Amino acid sequence: MSRYDLNTQAFLACVAPLLDSPEVHSMKQWRHHFSVTCYEHSLFVSYVAFRIARRLGWDYRSAARAGLLHDLYLYDAADHTAHPGNQCLDHPEFALRNARQLCPDLTPQEENAIVSHMFPLAIHLPRCREALVVNLADKVCALLEVIHIYRTRPIQRWLPRPAAAVTVTKW
Ligand SMILES: [Fe+2]
Ligand SMILES: [Fe+2]
């Protein structure tokens, strides 16, 4: 088995039940950064966080799960009537609320990773290694998305391709 397959297999073992959930699937309907959907971004963050945490010997399952759920706010961020506050600062709180409903066994580390992923823009501090790794992965992935590197062949070949990722977006 190739290294790609081993990493993909280990990654999917961490997040497969979440990838099958309607809530995670529903992120495919919303754009996040240009043409990149919220689902694609979340899967990207999840896999980058997983790979970093695994390489460092940290809790890669928590990093993968929190990475996948960190933007589970479940509304169209471009719709300014979707919620009254500041999207940039508020969405981690919405994501955490939805993640708790989806995943009652969320650990304190996973919760902190989700709610602190906008630090230093938002006030919640990353308080564990998994939160740091999700925070870093989110920024790296967002950068690669906004400079249009995400859809290049090397990134797409590197990313795992769970069956759920094949579904086309609604828009
Ligand atoms: Fe976010
Ligand atoms: Fe994000």
Image (spheres, helix red, strand yellow):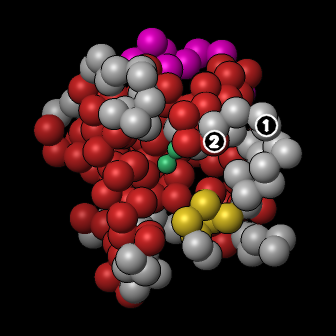
Q: In which quarter of the image is the C terminus?
A: bottom right
Q: Percent from the top left, x then y, of residue 165? A: 63, 65
Give, as a three-letter code, the residue at label 2: Gln
Can residue 8 be seen from the camera position used here? no
Q: Percent from the top left, x then y, of residue 37? A: 63, 64
Is label 1 in contact with label 2 (beta carbons under 8 Å)?
yes
- The label on residue 87 is 2
Q: Quadrant of residue 143?
A: bottom left
Decide: is 3 above or below 17: below
| Along the viewing direction, whichever of 45 and 138 lies nearer the viewer | 138
Magenta extent: 102-111
Please count the marks in the image. Answer: 2
- The label on residue 167 is none
Q: How crowded is mark 1: few (under 14 residues within 10 Å), some or many (20 or more)?
A: few
Q: Percent from the top left, x then y, of residue 41? A: 52, 59
- The label on residue 83 is 1
Can residue 151 be seen from the camera position used here? yes
| Alpha carbons under labels 1 and 2: distance apart | 8 Å
Give, as a three-letter code, the residue at label 1: His
Decide: is 161 above or below 70: below
Q: How crowded is mark 2: few (under 14 residues within 10 Å), some or many (20 or more)?
A: some
